[in-house]
Amino acid sequence: MKKVIIMLMGITLLVPSLINAMEINGTLAKMPVYSESKEKGILVDLVKAVAEVSENNIDIKVLPFSASLNLVIFNKKDFHMPLIKNDVLNQDELKYLYSTDTIFHVNFVIYCLKDKDINAQNISNFKVETDRAHVDYFPFDVIPSNSIEQSLLKVNSGEIDAFIFADFATDPYLKQMDNKKIKRELYKRFDSKIVFPKNEKGKQMDEMFVVALDKLRTSGKLQKIVAPIDTEYDNWQP
């Protein structure tokens, strides 16, 4: 009888760890610096750190931005990152849940020709492109773009007046082009979030990330990981 009791107690002790351990599948947007591949990028390092402190197995795929986000919207994946908080639409209008935590901040920058007088106050009067997943972030009409590089080439040729997107994602392309005709100007600094499916699983994912990120923040590891991308706007010019 004692052996049976001991065995049962052993099983009882194992149950909580089995319940807490989750198989999580997420997607990251493919962007320079942020997430270049499944093994390389600041967000890849962040997910690995979350998996470690939460003791969960987290599998990720790195995909084009819109594809990654859509997999969460259609409940095919447990989370997508990053996505800046939309201040134009309210939560009821969105097809996903924002994380409680802000993981870092993003500088959205206007890229236009130096001879054009375009700024955050008058940009609604011009022909502008942004990443396809971000067209709803602006209180004016914006053309969806599938390629940062192609949009910058359109700015250069005059096909469009401006391109607005995150500086850390766009600046590497601008530097690679070595283009002296294009200028940069801050449009807005956004909170960057994780997004989850708009269901109970999404709420569960948010709770898990809140606990994990709090542990990482307390240890200082979170700040160390995101420091290269959570920066104030640098008004450098080509």
Image (cartoon, rainbow, N blue to C red):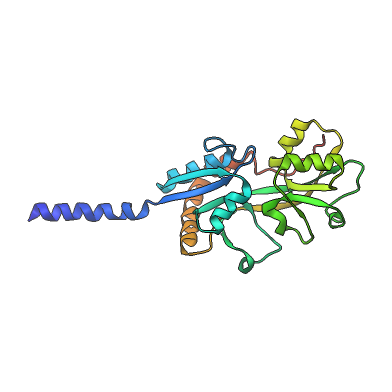
Q: Considering depth in this image, is 13 or 184 the residue closer to the camera?
A: 184
Q: How many marks?
A: 0
Q: Residue 151's x, y, as percent? A: 77, 43
Identify the residue shown where x is 59% and y is 53%: 69
User: Is 238 displayed left or right of 77 in the figure?
Assistant: right
Q: Residue at x 47, y 49 (%)?
A: 25
Farthest residue toward the left?
Answer: 1
Q: Determine whether, in the image, residue 229 is placed left or right of residue 138.
A: left
Q: Would residue 161 appear left or right of 139 to someone viewing this image?
A: right
Residue 99 in view of the camera: no
Query: Can residue 8 be seen?
Result: yes
Quadrant assignment for the N terminus: bottom left
- Residue 184 image offset from top left, x and y in percent: 81, 42
Q: Quadrant of residue 89?
A: bottom right
Q: Say whether residue 213 is left or right of residue 186.
A: left
Camera-side residue: 222 or 146? 146
**Residue 126 drawn above or below residue 90:** above
- The quadrant in which residue 170 appears is top right
Relative to the observer, which residue lies in front, 97 or 101? 97
Coordinates of residue 6 in the picture (x, y in percent): 15, 52
Q: Is residue 204 above or below residue 114?
A: below
Where residue 2 sits: x, y (%)? 9, 54
State the quadrant of the C terminus: top right
